């Protein structure tokens, strides 16, 4: 009999809104829903849990049951929030994650690499590059502003990393504006 669940692939507030709507239309009483987490008003039976799993999976999400996967999903959510909310990272990413998850960073790093097949730092870079692509396509900020917003020390550093990851300079990417973006849940 549980009422709190960790949800995989919930990467934005729209995901939470969609899932909440689908759960309510399936007669689940949602107490709270936010990135990667769902709390129902009351504990549910095993039969209701199976129904919950079906609703969640039908909408492209997954309930996470093991602690390692929950921790990896929490790491992803913290990085996504960091990149998408323009929150300034004070200090190192390793310190930020260790503090927010109250776990040793070496443990987090090993776990993440084993589950995802890439390092936390690589995942962070890929998230920043996808956000940069989005900002370039929107055209509201110049490249220097994008570099600053994503926490790069300079536009040159941003441009080098962007080209390394995409094969294109940011200015060339801006010119072609082809659909070069990757859904963040696919990273």
Image: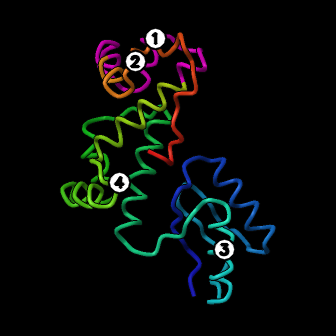
The residues tagged by marks 3 and 2 sit, at their Cα atoms, a distance apart of: 41 Å
Cβ atoms under marks 2 and 1 closer than 8 Å: yes
- Dot 1 falls on a residue whose secondary structure is helix
Rate crowding at label 3 as few (under 14), some (14 to 19) or many (20 or more) other CA atoms within 10 Å: some
Residue position marked by numbered label 4 in the rendering: 100
Q: Nearer the viewer, mark 3 or mark 4?
A: 3
Q: Could you tell me which residue is drawn at 51 percent across and 37 percent down?
A: 182
Sooner in the amino-acid sequence: mark 4 or mark 1? 4
Q: How is the image coloured?
A: rainbow
Q: Quadrant of residue 87?
A: top left
Q: Which mark is residue 54?
A: 3
Secondary structure under the numbered disc 2 in the rendered image: loop
First in sequence, mark 3 or 1: give its number.
3
Element type where label 3 sits in the image: helix
Labels 3 and 2: the sequence-earlier one: 3
Task: Name the residue tied to disc 2.
Answer: 168
* Tag 3 and tag 4, C-beta contact below 8 Å: no
Identify whether 109 is placed above or below 45: above
Residue 172: image tag: 1
Is 156 one of the magenta-colored residues?
yes
């Amino acid at each position: 009999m549980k009422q709190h669940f960790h949800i995989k692939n919930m990467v934005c507030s729209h995901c939470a809104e969609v899932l909440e709507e689908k759960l309510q239309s399936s007669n689940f009483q949602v107490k709270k829903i936010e990135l990667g987490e769902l709390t129902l008003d009351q504990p549910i039976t095993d039969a209701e849990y199976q129904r919950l799993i079906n609703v969640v999976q039908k909408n492209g999400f997954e309930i996470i049951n093991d602690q390692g996967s929950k921790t990896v999903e929490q790491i992803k959510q913290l990085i996504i929030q960091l990149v998408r909310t323009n929150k300034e990272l004070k200090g190192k990413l390793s310190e930020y994650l260790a503090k927010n998850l109250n776990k040793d960073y070496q443990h987090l790093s090993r776990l993440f690499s084993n589950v995802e097949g890439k390092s936390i730092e690589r995942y962070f870079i890929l998230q920043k590059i996808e956000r940069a692509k989005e900002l370039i396509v929107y055209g509201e900020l110049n490249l220097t502003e994008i570099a600053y917003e994503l926490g790069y020390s300079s536009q040159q550093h941003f441009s080098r990393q962007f080209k390394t990851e995409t094969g294109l300079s940011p200015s060339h990417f801006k010119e072609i504006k082809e659909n070069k973006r990757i859904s963040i849940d696919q990273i």
